[in-house]
Amino acid sequence: MNIKQRVIGLLSEVEKGKYSNILLNEYFSKNNLGRGERGFITEVFYGVIRNEIYLNYQLQKRTKSIKKDWIKNLLKISIYQATFMDSDEKGIAWEATELAKKKFGAPVGKFVNGVIRSYLREKDEEIKALKAEDKLDILYSYPRWFYDKIKKEYGTETENLLISLKKIPYMSVRVNRLKYTEVEFEELLKSMRIEIIKKVDSVYYIDSGIVLHTDEFKDGKIIAQDGSSYLAAKILNPLPGEKVVDTCSAPGSKTAVLAELMHNEGEIFALDIHQHKIKLIEENLKKLGVTIVKPIKLDARKLKEQGQKFDKILVDAPCSGYGVLRKKPEALYNKNMVNVKELSELQYEILEASAFSLKVEGELVYSTCTIFSEENTDNIKKFLDNHKNFSVTKFEIPSNINGRFDSIGGFLIDYTEEILDNFYIIKLRKDFE
């Protein structure tokens, strides 16, 4: 099967509602493809999703309607290649024409050829015009409300942020020190000729995802995890023997970090509101050799009703996810400002319940994978205004991670960080009851 036909098939599945990251991982696990083929499919597949608005804009300018989704996706792939990849433009037009001709006949091939060549002639001038007319939302494929919000909050940094969130993510895995060592993992990478792009403690960013098909991954010696997610758990710094709760635990990767830091000694309650996710947490932690976690089906807002107090609490709150758009680009198109406000209210309720359930002198880490102040700084300011018995605790961020501390002591791993997910982290201490 032609490699572009593979991408067309994957895009059609996303249009049916499947999550892009899960879909692609499943596809690669079922199809034995070379490294170059996987790389091309990944870039074009995510590239088309990331640039959906721009690609649709260009098609609408050149066609009245395209009834066949197959043709529409072929044209999107071709325009994406011509705009965002270092590809031969004549080759792009020729290959698309031949694919369309072979599947639907010569007239459709001629139509495809005409659309692509029209775009190639006008591309450079159109990109200049979009910039001149303050239509960066179209050029970089963001809903207009999102663009206006970013402009208001980030000002002169807006274009750099928009570009950053569209970059191709690297594969990241964490060494599970309960079963494995970093030395052993680095030897494995060397034997597989896999390059290390960046290292954050025991999290490695690498140039190939093939490690997910190794026995080491199947045995729980390594786990797919981003450095930002890892840091949120590490900064909580739970100690062996402590009683800890992870309020929003699924799929359990941060819970596993907590258990590792505790040397698998103590007790961790891992909460989630969905029973199927409780099962997922159990399976993942068993695979990793974690034995101190008790998964519980519970809405984190009801934590205080359990009548227990904890030494440490991790609140990695449900959020809009705008900090992980590199990995989940479709999240841009299914939320709006109303959702952001609703989520900030939910986050605050979880914080309230957690504050009640924390012991005096206990510590709490609040984190999100988003970039909006409503879900980050503003929420914590409100919380601190209403809870004078809490204070912000200082913490360190590794020197090789870019970002900024806000006015209250929280850290945002922001668009200047080229590798890690954008993430907000703040640590609080309960000084008295």
Image (cartoon, rainbow, N blue to C red):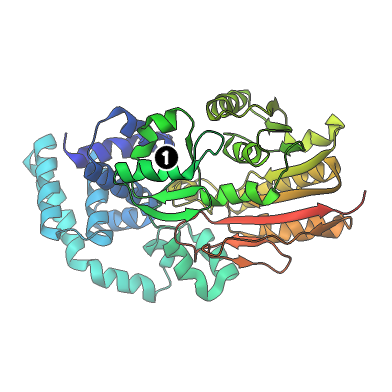
Residue at 53% from the left image edge and 54% from the top image edge? 323
Q: Position of residue 217 (x, y in %)?
A: 43, 33
Residue 385: quarter of image: bottom right
Q: Position of residue 316 (x, y in %)?
A: 65, 45
How many numbered circles does the render carry? 1
Residue at 45% from the left image edge and 69% from the top image edge? 160
Quadrant into which the N terminus falls: top left
Is 383 drawn above or below residue 218 in the view shown?
below
> Helix, strand, or loop for circle 1?
helix
Using residue 251 as the reference point, say whether residue 237 is left or right of it: right
In front of the other: 250 or 339: 250
Looking at the image, the residue that sits furthest to the right is 433
Q: Is residue 71 visible?
A: no
Using residue 386 as the reference point, say whether residue 290 is left or right of it: left
Residue at 49% from the left image edge and 66% from the top image edge? 416
Find disc 1 in the rendering and name its residue. Answer: 21
Q: Is residue 174 visible?
A: yes
Neighbourhood count class around disc 1 (C-alpha, 10 Å): few under 14, some 14–19, many 20 upward:
some
Is 210 drawn above or below residue 236 in the view shown?
above
Is 352 drawn above or below residue 255 in the view shown?
below
Q: Position of residue 363 (x, y in %)?
A: 78, 49
In front of the other: 68 or 322: 322
Q: Position of residue 386 (x, y in %)?
A: 86, 56
Using residue 98 as the reference point, say whether residue 86 is left or right of it: right
Using residue 410 as the reference point, say whether residue 144 is left or right of it: left
In front of the other: 384 or 268: 268
Residue at 61% from the left image edge and 29% from the top image edge? 290
